Image (spheres, grey):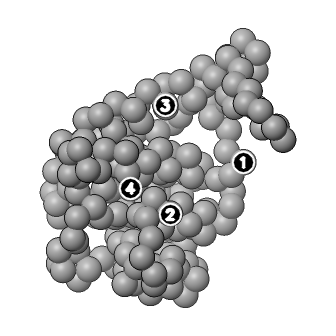
Amino acid sequence: MDDAPEVAVLRLGHRPGRDDRMTTHVALTARALGADRVVLPENASDAADTARSVTGRFGGPFAVEQRQPRSVLRGWTGRVVHLTMYGEPVQAVEDAVRAARRDHPLLAVVGAEKVPFDVYEGADWNVAVTNQPHSEVAGLAVFLDRLFEGRELDARWPDADRRVVPQATGKRVVDAEEHGGDG
């Protein structure tokens, strides 16, 4: 989306059967709102397949990986933002996060089950979009929108096979021939 170092999203956990839809939505939200890639747990194959399929149809670039989440955290060489309702308000730290991203890759971590305390301790920022219970998908969406200052909303998607045409009512999706493949 821009020339700054990458923004990756890490889904910290995944409970098969319980988290399938939520993990899928984490991946799709990461893609739609400007992240460069998502890293999902190894047991989230359906969510990974869905995110890859959407990227294939609606364009990229966007990478989907499956790895052991704790190894990603241990090996991350950039800055880490842990999204949690227990963190500092996003509006209080967004400028500092944005400034740090100019020079460092950024990993946004979203949990599933209870997040171990060492994740809180190891993060550069523990960030909340509100200190009320809410969805990790909502937290990720608000965070990415704040990080990119709304620019992600106008993104173009190269190599798209299809594109949604915005309209006041109804649904319209056109294929590559109708929109020239420019996303």
Q: Which residue is drawn at the image coordinates 44% and 71% (left, top)? A: 134
**Mark 1 or mark 3, whichever is nearer to me:** 3
Secondary structure of the residue carrying tag 1 is helix
Residue 94: x and y in percent read 55, 78
Position of 167 relative to 2 (above/below): above
Residue for badge 3: 54
Residue 54: x and y in percent read 49, 31
Residue for badge 1: 154
Going by the numbered disc 2, the residue's amino acid type is: Ala
Position of 96 relative to 101 (above/below): below
Residue for badge 2: 138
Work out how far the residue at label 1 is from the one at label 3, CA to CA, in angstroms: 18 Å
Work out how far the residue at label 2 is from the one at label 4, CA to CA, in angstroms: 14 Å
Q: Which residue is drawn at the image coordinates 81% and 37% (left, top)? A: 169
Decide which of 138, 77 is in the foreground and name it. Answer: 138
Which part of the image, by quadrant, shows the C terminus?
Answer: top right
Do labels 1 and 3 touch, CB within 8 Å? no
Residue 88: x and y in percent read 44, 87
* Mark closer to the chain start, 2 or 1: 2
